[in-house]
Amino acid sequence: MTSPISCLSILVIPLLVTSLFYQASNATIEVKADQALLDSICDQTQDYDFCMSTFHGDARTAVADRDGLALLSIAINTDTVQATIDQIQDILKALTDPLDKYRIQNCLTDFSDALVQLRAAYTASSAESYREVIGFIADVARKAVDCDAEYKKSPPLRESPISDKTLKVTKLTDITFAIINTIIST
């Protein structure tokens, strides 16, 4: 008569071996965010230094693969857009000029729309629907440009009080495009 332990080992050992082979095969496919990968992505952007500082400034970069970097870039942009929305709400409280209020209110609408698009991009990226991500991220970039245009399309021409944020959002979308390009081309 066989003992219960030997029966259990007959079942468990093959499962463990299969699990090890599965993990080993996945490890060869997965490319972690080493310096070479970051260089190849950041070389495709308009601002290499901004791209590298964005990745080096986030601890999640070290454990991310290409797909994870796409999610990470979208998450960083989502945080930036949300912080900008909060900033716009504070700016609105301090404004008295009706034109300035109108302009920044339009920016609030643009950034709120961008936030929705970023959340959709994150979901699409999680599902590895990268062509969808491109569309969502393009919309985010357009919304940032639209906000800046509010201050340049009619007199009095001014610089947007959040122009640094709109620039950051467009640079982050550029990073996401570069990552998606890297994923699609491999």
Image (cartoon, grey):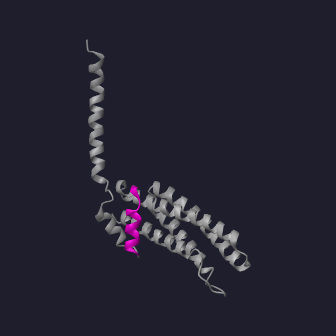
148 shown above or below 177? below
Image coords of residue 56 (percent x, y):
37, 63
Query: Which corner quadrant holds the C terminus?
Result: bottom left
Give the vertical position of 129 relative to 96 (above or below): above
Image position of 98 (left or right of 86): right
Q: Quadrant of residue 163?
A: bottom right
From this viewpoint, which residue is outermost toward the front?
94
Residue 54 among those drawn in magenta: yes
Q: Residue at x 48, y 66 (%)?
A: 134
Percent coordinates x, y for residue 151 in the rendering = 62, 81
Q: Quadrant of residue 68?
A: bottom left
Q: Relative to 166, is 33 on the left or the right?
A: left
Please tell me which residue is depicted at 54% across the width and 59% down the height of the picture.
120
Q: Residue 65, image x and y in percent? A: 35, 56
Q: Where is residue 23 shown, x and y percent of the image?
A: 30, 44
Q: Residue at x 40, y 75 (%)?
A: 47
116, 168: nearer the viewer: 168
Q: Compared with residue 183, is residue 95 higher up or lower down, i.e. above or below?
A: below
Q: Nearer the viewer, residue 172 or 2?
A: 172
Residue stretch rendered in magenta on the structure? 47-59
In the rendered structure, does residue 18 fall within the stretch colored magenta?
Answer: no
Q: Main secondary structure of the magenta part?
A: helix
Q: Which residue is farthest top?
A: 1
Quadrant for the N terminus, please. Answer: top left
